[in-house]
Image (tube, rainbow, N blue to C red):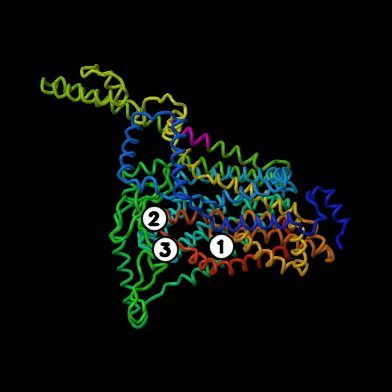
Amino acid sequence: MDDPILFDRRAEAGQVTVDTTRTSLNGFGIFAIIVFAIVSLIVIHPIRIRIPAPIAKLIRSTSRKLWLALAGPPDVDQQEQDAVEAELDTRNPDDAHSKSMYITIDHVSAPVIGVLVLLATTTIGGEQVKQGIVGEDGIEPYDVLALFISLAYIAISLDATGLLRYLAFLICLKAGRQGREAKGKTLYLLLYFFFWSAGVLVGNDPVILSGTAFLVYFTRVAGISPPDAWIWAEFVAANISSAVLVSSNPTNLVIATGFDVDFITYTAYMVLPAFASAVGGLGAMLIYFRNKESGGGREKEGEEEGKSTIRKFVESVPVIGSRMQGRSSSGQIRQRSTAPVDNGEAVPDTATSPTAAGGTTPNSETPSTIPIHKSSKGKRTHPLIYIPETIIRPDVDPRAALVDKTGAIFGSIVMAATLATLVGTSVIGGVKVFEIAVPGAVLCFVRDGVADWLRWRKLRLEKRKESREEVTREATVVGNGSEAIEMEAVAVSTSAAATSDRNGAAAAAGSDIKRTDSSATAIPAASPRSRNALRRLIAFHSHLTTVFPTVSIVLSRLPFPLLPFAFSMFILVQALAHVGFINILSRGLGTVCSSGYIPTAFFISFLGIVLCNIGGTNIGATILLTKSVRSPYFTERISHLSQRDQQLIEKVAQYSIAFGSNVGALGGTFAASLAGLLWLGGLKQGGIRVGAGQFLKWCAVVVLPSTAIGIAVIVAEVRYFHVSA
């Protein structure tokens, strides 16, 4: 029997905002569950729908006409380009008009479509949409996501200065003492705990964005093939470490606000489980990625042969580090790009694929870049080296990676001050978390914009100065003789004619030096202003990107697609609560958890990991479990226990949800977390491919020991220690 007195007491406290009397599903409830399940499956495996060729042709033609109607006739340069494209289309009509078009429904669009379907069928109404955005029951989605986006801007801006790559290179160089090569396992351990520490401070997403690009470059230059152990260590460390601070992962914010836990108490309970779990995962990886030598008495010879192969591979790669130190590569670094730096040359006998930096990287069909040859008897003829005994030191100056020292110092101060203020105000209470984080992000935004404008202005002045010096040299040559005068007249005439063609201005061959100076000092991106407002807007956007490159890069890397996805998942979970599914789930969880706090810890953790991989990433799983544990039906199922046991079960449940939502990224699917999708994209950009089966196998290696050790620590903390702010 349900306890109505308990429900009334929870309702008076403002903790119950859904229909607590609904404990069975009607037709709308079943339909809502089906929609949620379909959305979750699409998030895991996006759908790509092919559009028939006639419809695709019609869409292209309509789009072209609509563009011309909005943007007007193209400019002169655009007309020439369109003429060339039209000529190519005429020669290759099949390529131009018969290309297939596809509609992709992924993790961004699927939840939105699901919400629209529920609204259209009146399964939910406007009240559920409002609760999914504004929040209820102590969980405020807009507050959580505003904090996450703000901290993401600070972290990505800090990463764009090159600080993380600078520290990583510094560790690689310092690992070898007195100029000697570093030991492979020593460097592996240092990088693992460096990524773990960085994930604690800035969160898993910035570490994945920067660390993946660094490892693609580092393993290639150091001759580490296959790079499996290194790229997987980064992924494991970054995701486990994100459980430590509330600000490191949006799921932590949901849990802290949902259970009304201040930031200090949360971190005090989660830092040891996260560290112990990271150590457990490291031990599993060292066993799995152990080097496999050749058999028989030729083991030592095979090892030497393997080392020789690695050295030959590295010697065939041009010294990328020296190029980073040179002036020729400063263009890539000045733009504060985190893409792997390359020299634009392909490694012999490897395919190449373009990267964001404009160069090429070795591409391989498997994670390994050096194949393992087998003899007729099936034995390896070469050892498989995951972690070499020694690592060839990268020929690079770490300071070259730190492209903006002032920005790194400023960003570090802002990040530290923001986190410290968040911790302090969480103890005091009464302050929204976004009210602390948004000002910090605004400070970094303004600083990045001012620094970009000053650099652009300095570069512009330098170009003008160079143009004036060039004009002065030309004038000096003119005064040296009539032959020089004739040559200069021809040059000036040619320059003026070219300027007339570009700008539509009449220019005489014998114009004054002032006209030559003005044309020489014009911005290269300048072009005649179009009369169409849309084209002027596009040109203005291009100009802003040129003037403010850092701001543009950071904004482009912000996880804005997370916003519609997260809000829609909040609404979908609210729909499940509205139809009574949360109450049913709460009763089931309460029944299992009534066995004690130890079964509660392991059951909820593993359930959280499973839901992260089948329930719409870790955000959907966290919201679902948080609402279920906070439901009065959960409390009713454990009410027969003593007060102390009830408190232990509720406390271990909330920290088990937090732990499972972070370790859930290691559950077997890329879509279990946003970090998994970012990691996969970064590897593909660097020419390293990891298949779904390979990813599942790596997850199976670490998820069990990591989860078991971490949950054991949580149980011990809750049982024997008491932490309160």
Mostly what secondary structure, the magenta segment?
helix
**Label drawn at residue 136:** none
- Amino acid under label 3? Pro
- Vertical placement of residue 425 versus 581, above or below: above
**Residue 187, image x, y percentages:** 44, 62
**Residue 675, image x, y percentages:** 53, 54
Instruction: Identify which residue, 467 or 300, lies in the foreground.
Output: 467
Q: Which residue corresponds to mark 3? A: 227
Q: Which residue corresponds to mark 2? A: 217
Mark positioned earlier in the residue sequence (3 or 2): 2
Q: What is the spatial separation of the Cα atoms under label 3 and label 2, in whole angstroms?
A: 11 Å
Q: Label 2 crowding class (10 Å Cα cut-off): few <14, some 14-19, many 20+?
A: some
| Label 1 close to label 3 by CB (< 8 Å) | no
Left or right of residue 468: residue 685: right
Instruction: Identify which residue, 614 or 121, lies in the foreground.
Output: 121
- Amino acid under label 2? Tyr
In the rendered image, residue 447 lying in the magenta stretch gets the answer yes
Report the magenta residues as a range: 445-453
| Label 3 close to label 2 by CB (< 8 Å) | no
Q: Which residue corresponds to mark 1? A: 666
Q: Label 3 crowding class (10 Å Cα cut-off): few <14, some 14-19, many 20+?
A: many
